[in-house]
Amino acid sequence: MAKQTEFVREVADMKADFPQWYTDVVLKTGLVDYGPVKGTMVIRPYGYAIWEIIQKELDARFKATGHRNAYFPMFIPESYLKREAEHVEGFAPEVAVVTYAGGAELAEKLVVRPTSETIICEMYAKWMQSYRDLPIKINQWANVVRWEKTTRPFLRTSEFLWQEGHTAHATEEEALAETMQMLEVYREFAETVLAVPVFVGRKTEKEKFAGAVATFGMEAMMLDGKSLQAGTSHYLGQNFAKAFNMQFLDRDGKHKYAYSSSWGVSTRLIGALIMAHGDQRGLVLPPHVAPVQAVIIPIADHRPGVREKAAELFSALEKAGIRAELDSRDYSPGWKFNEWEMKGAPVRIEVGPRDIEQGTVFVARRDTLEKQTLPMEGLAGSVSALLEEIQKNMLEKSRAFRDSHVVTAGDFEDFKEAVNGNFVKCGWCGDRACEDRIKEETAATARVMPFDEEASGTCVCCGKPAKHTVLFAKAY
RNA sequence: CGGGGUGUAGCGCAGAUUGGUAGCGCGCAUGGUUCGGGACCAUGAGGCCGUGGGUUCAAAUCCCGCCACUCCGACCA
């Protein structure tokens, strides 16, 4: 077997230069290409196929929790953005604005949505008259634009794809329950589909969404020891209701402001997938999101029977619901092995003259690189089982890695040492000054305050009694 | 916005110090032989050398400006 180091020629050494490794992998596996405008990306078919699976999986979960899809315009009157003070302050620096259209200067500038709370709340206000009209639970799959300074494919691009759920409720309890429910939907999705274990919890004031009462998020650990915010769910209270006059007449005959929530995940999840599971050979995709779960590679397919047998096995896998591909391209087998390994296909099946003689196939799994011989008889069943085994193994492996990179720190010196490449769990007094100082001196930020952690001990920064337990990390 | 890097064929690069009108590897096309870990032979196609100006008989090469991309920070999904 080839040594790991041989694969450095294809993509940068992930231990020596992780960012370059990431860039090499996303480009060379055909997930994306750079667009002509700075910070934009073309999501190529292989990358988009992953996104489509993410969409399908999430959409089913949204529907199951009572949401429906709709679509709102991407152009938002500039004045809308200004109605919620914190919101405009947070987003103003990164919005793209259309000032000229149809051959003339526009009377009112149009913001290209960086997120859609404003326009959606404006519409919701029209649609709600009575408590009977509530709750409103809508999700939209859309693109948004945020003019970021530093961009990287999937992780941060000027334009990206996401879903944003927006709900309005009659009571605070209901809106909060919605917020927490969707966070849980995200957590479950991340772990069972992406095989990426996450920490969930509340965000600090500093880190929360501009305009929210509270933001909750999930954080995943990447292989370089940095954290990636993988999804957020916001409890908006009545902030947007007041800014957009979302009022309804309640049972008691009084006009009341609605309580709202919003929640989203983006194509960044694909970045999470890559950086949580990849290796020196490239992508390692968990079967549940792999566009090609099992690739069949015929060997010496000019020999009698090979082509037919490969096609027969392919169709058996497809019938069993496996996303299979028969790679009959005119390249050498070794070339295909390497390409599919780089592209992260979970299972590779080789079918050659020898196999046909013996009634077996040669099967290699991507996660462990182990190989085995399996009988052709009942192949679909054994491959399905193998795919599930791989999925399970990848989650376990990721969880073990993540857990081995969580450390606790009692004082600031420990903290500074530990925060390189780890989540650091520690006490925090709740003061912004300490949070700012930690960031200034260590580049680490408060990722989440885990729900199940009681505050204990002292603030890692100032030594005063801790009000919260926080996970800090350097983040993307 | 600050700091670094890079722009020459689809990709990766050489050529620049010593100006003379562009080359290598991979890839691509065709034909043949191959096919169980990145095959081989032969033939062939492909480049206003990022861009604008300057110096010169002559600029990929020297000088000045600009632009783009990329990486690292501050801002963010």
Image (tube, coloured by chain):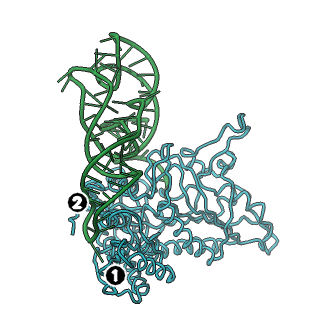
Q: For residue A361, which numbered disc appears in the image?
A: 1
Give the chain of mark 2.
A
The total of numbered circles placed on residues is 2
Q: Is residue A292 left or right of residue B21?
A: right
Q: Which residue is nearer to you in this view: A228 or B37?
A: B37
Q: Which image quadrant is residue A302 in?
A: bottom left
Note whether residue A412 is visible.
Answer: no
**Residue B29 to residue A402: above or below:** above
**Residue A353 location in percent, x, y?**
32, 78
- Indicate the chain on which mark 1 is placed: A
What's the residue at 43%, 72% (across, down)? Answer: A326
Please tell me the colour of chain A: cyan
Residue at the right extreme, as displayed:
A253
Binning the other alpha carbons within 10 Å of mark 1 as few (below 14), some (14 to 19) or many (20 upward) gives many
| Percent coordinates x, y for residue A370 in the rendering | 28, 77
Comparing A70 with A76, the one in front is A70
**Residue A6 has which mark?**
2
Q: Classify mark 2: helix, strand or loop.
A: helix
Q: Which chain is green?
A: B
- Measure the alpha-carbon separation of dots 1 and 2: 27 Å
Query: Camera-side residue: B12 or A267?
Result: B12
Q: Amino acid at mark 2?
A: Glu
Q: Secondary structure at mark 1?
A: strand
Q: Quadrant of the C terminus of chain A?
A: bottom left
Question: x and y percent of residue B37 in the render?
Answer: 25, 67
- Seen in the picture, residue A185 relative to A263 is either above or below; the reply is below
Q: Is residue A400 visible?
A: yes
